[in-house]
Amino acid sequence: MGKILWVDLTNGLIEEETVPDETYERFLAGYGLGAKILFERMEPGVDPLGPDNILGFLSGLLSGTGALFAGRWQVVAKSPLTGGWGDSNCGGDLAPAIKRTGYDGIFFTGKSPRPVYLLIEGEEKKLVDAADLWGVDAIETEERLQEKHGKAFRVATIGRGGERQSLISGIVNAKGRLAARSGLGAVMGSKNLKALCLKGATRVQMHDQKRVLALSKEFRARLKRDEKVDRFFSGGVVGVMGRLLKYFKTQPAMAGDLFKLTLRIWGTSGIAAMSAENGDSPVKNWKGAGYKDFPLTTRSKKIGDDAVTAYETKKYACHSCPLSCGGKCSVKDGPHPLPETHKPEYETLCALGTLLLVDDLERIYQANELLNRAGVDTISAGSTIAWAFECFERGILTEEDTEGLQLRWGDGQAMLACVEKLISGEGFGELLKDGVKAASEKLGKGSKQWAMHAGGQELPMHDGRYDAGYGLAYEVEPTPGRHTIASYTYSDLMNLGAKTKQMRKAKLLHSFKDRFGVHGKGQEMSVISAFMDVVNGCGMCIFGVSVGGDPPVVEWINAATGWHRTFDEYLDVGRRIKAVRQAFNVRESISPADTKMTGRARGVPPLDTGPNKDVTPPFDDLARDFYLAMGWDPVSGAPMDHTLDRLGLPEVKEAISKLHG
């Protein structure tokens, strides 16, 4: 769109800024543009919850162009959860709405003296008093704003979590979809910014719209292949596969077509049973094994695939998505009826289920609804509650501490009660509300060793002892504890080896040596990591580049912009974006030693049972290889001078050199 909008909340000034074409060529849009803006405009050391933090909402380069899967919007700021670079992204319908206001991003500075929301309607832009919305949950806030201004308005808002500046709060769109990670809801709350309410009419201009649409039509046709076999995989077959594979020292390469079918039928809930059984899911606060503690036939099947979709009333898709992996559901009976709610994602089912040994699906539905309305990250909430369960088991927390709750593994009512207390932030909830790192530091008594996080961010629900690529990404990415960037699983799903000689081609099976060897893995993960910065710069969904069919990402970008770049040239754009995000952390004095996972997640000590028995992946060696492949110093994490020279980042080079005197 060529412009961004600046909103100074302190004095109410709203101004637009023209962005040079060169900036897009070097950083795309999305969090690439956000990284450049924040690195240049923010001084190091600012308080993440203070007025000097900059909060940016961004659409992607391909948002609104007709390219498939380009419906993700992103939010960036300094993270109050990790103290470094913070970003989060979300589907729904906000990404094209940002574009139609005429801007690629909306950036907020300062702090409003009272609660407000930003209203953009056509050319009109103003801050509106939000006193009557403060204290209202996120879904009701969206409904009220649409009742007031019209159903065509698109809303991003915080709930009680963000208002109370919970460090694990996110930002809500589409009545329950969250940009959940990095604690950026707390940043929004700290600025007294309740919501964005947007309705624009600016047309998205492209170099060759016919080519973009033709590429989308062709790719959509490829995605429709083999739909007749969809139901062959229903009835828990995926879970049975996971049950069988736990007996072998191999890991199957996930085929993109199978992943596509799984998403079409169940959404991400389709992998919950399989992942609990085969070692992908962490179990019992990362100390258990699914087949023993949460077996498929009696437990995990109750919170996965068909059990979840039994409540589904209709499927839905994010903007420009042909898969419709989302679902609206209804829980009609039981103690917690829900007329309409979102189908819980895999991460939620695992965090509130497998991680706690809870197979009470209706209570998981209720907990998911409460957290969505409060705008709180379900991954972080589940991880924090699992820590509390273990502390109770070990006698570190007592019923006096928990206000009478008995935190027993598998107790769905206790899980739900903890969710309610965490959201309230009062009593026992005051200990839980800011996530597991803060909770363990407050409690002490040796409880830090059971707090599962990397750099302050709770670990996602994919076990690095099963797929070491996930664990590596949790430790080395500029936003630690992030599961949507790099892994061996994504390596196979994306098959980037067919596009570049910088990594191998996908395999059908990974041997034990493949899974936990070091040679070449740093380079492989660096390619996927750089590619995902391109994907995020375009506002695309990771699922869209993981469902087979060879998605024409490069062709879409070139058609939309008129550029003529190759895949490897775009990888360098991704490396440039990542170097700036990483330099942001270095400038905040965050080093690789600060973002290592808790020992248990690193396989120290190793598990004594299950698919991941005796596994201690060589994360230090993998990290060193990754940093060197990226051209970063393995000790400090800083991009090295020759890397910054090659990527054309003299301003970053100068900033880092100042740190060294």
Image (cartoon, rainbow, N blue to C red):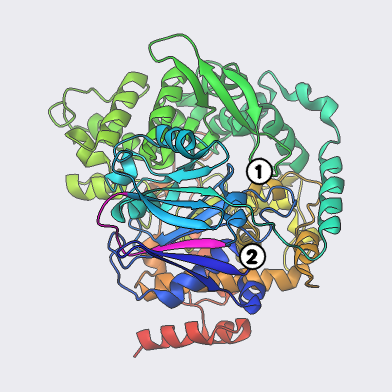
- The C terminus sits in image quarter: bottom left
Report the side of 83 relative to 569 (left or right): left
The local crowd at label 2, few if under 14, some if 14 to 19, many if 20 or more residues have their Cα within 10 Å, is many
In the rendered image, residue 178, in percent from the top left (x then y), is placed at 48, 42
Residue 254 vertical position relative to residue 627 in the rendered view, above or below: above
Report the side of 587 relative to 565 (left or right): left
Residue kind at label 2, given as amino acid type: Met
Magenta range: 104-115
Nearest to the observer: residue 587 or residue 522: 587
In the rendered image, residue 454, in percent from the top left (x then y), is placed at 40, 54
The local crowd at label 1, few if under 14, some if 14 to 19, many if 20 or more residues have their Cα within 10 Å, is many
The residue drawn where x is 45% and y is 77% is: 40
Query: Which badge, 2 or 1, comes first in the chain's sequence?
Result: 2
Nearest to the observer: residue 12 or residue 425: 12
The residue drawn where x is 51% and y is 33% is: 610
Q: Quadrant of residue 646?
A: bottom right
Q: Is residue 500 visible?
A: no
The residue drawn where x is 29% and y is 31% is: 389
CA gap between label 2 and label 1 equals: 18 Å
Q: Is residue 316 visible?
A: yes
- Circle 1 SS class: loop
Residue 67 vertical position relative to residue 316 in the rendered view, above or below: below
Residue 643 vertical position relative to residue 459 in the rendered view, above or below: below
Disc 1 marks which residue? 319
The image's mark for residue 1 is: 2
